[in-house]
Image (spheres, rainbow, N blue to C red):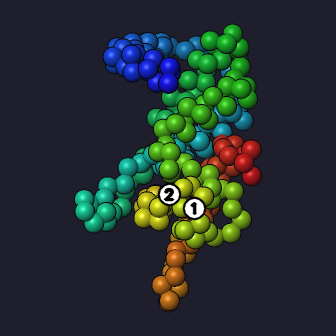
Amino acid sequence: MAKVRAAVANSNNKDVMRKELAAAAGGVLAQRVPNDVKVPKEIEERIIHLADLVAKARTPVKRRGGTEEVEYLPEAEVGTRLAGQLIQLARGIALARGQTECDESVMNVILHVACSGIEKRRLDALGYLWRQQDLVETTLVGTALHLGCGTVNRVLEDLWSLRLVDRQDRPKAMGPYKWKLSEMAVERIKEAGLFVEEK
């Protein structure tokens, strides 16, 4: 209870703190990071694959109010700008740590930062499908993620429209859809080194 009371007492200061943190982070990102901080080719390639995956996975899918129907197929974001930002961030992290080269510990931070830009339910669905060997029914995905069938179906449909998952057509008896990661998503996840500890 004491922690809850402290959080309520500090709630008035949160807006001020957020503005100060945003200004500080903006100042850091605005600084020019020296290019002599080396990004090894392997880490650069991982960041390129990660940026492409994240850019697609965070693309909004517009749905019609009431019916929840997808209004139009989304134009997935391209990861070019994000890749450049993540490379600069990697250099900045290495520089702040006194390193002359980005290493695995820097890459781990980049993975965390990049994935925080993906809506959690989408990221969880991608992670769950990554761990599966075969096609998975909607209900099983929902059970694993603690989401209702309607919600998980919308999440999977969004990822499907972004070409990150494949969907098996329903059988004639109108059984449930089955899902798996698309080949492109598998390649991006594998090359980026995302979810590797989970498989």
| 123 sits to left or right of 100 | left
Q: What residue type is labelled 2?
A: Leu
Identity of the residue furthest to the bottom in this view: 172
Q: Residue 20 at what x, y percent from top left? A: 39, 12
Q: What is the secondary structure assignment of the residue under circle 2?
A: loop
Q: Name the residue at 67% across, 13% down.
A: 97
Please state the horizontal and vertical placement of residue 163, each as a whole percent of the image. 50, 60
The label number, if any, that marks residue 192 in the structure image: none
Q: Is residue 119 visible?
A: yes
Answer left or right for 60 relative to 44: left
Mark 2: give few (<14), some (14-19) or many (20+) Cα within 10 Å. some
Crowding near pointer 1: few (<14 within 10 Å), some, many (20+)? few
Query: Residue at (64%, 49%) from the top-left corner?
Result: 189
Residue nearest the observer in this picture, 22 or 97 = 22
Q: In this view, does 120 lie above or below 172?
A: above
Q: Which residue occupies the extreme top position in the image?
A: 98
Residue most extreme to the left: 65
Nearest the eye: 89 or 117: 117
> So how many labels did they put on this image?
2
Residue that badge 2 annotates: 147
The residue shown at (58%, 13%) is 34
Q: Name the residue under label 1.
A: 143
* Residue at left offset 68%, top offset 46%: 195
**Residue 188 percent coordinates (x, y):** 62, 50
Q: Which of 21 and 35 is in front in this view?
A: 21
Q: Distance between the residues labelled 1 and 2?
A: 6 Å
Viewer-closest of 190 and 124? 124
Where 30 falls versus 69 (above or below)? above
The image quarter containing residue 98 is: top right
Type of amino acid under label 1: Thr
Give the image location of residue 130, x and y in percent: 66, 56
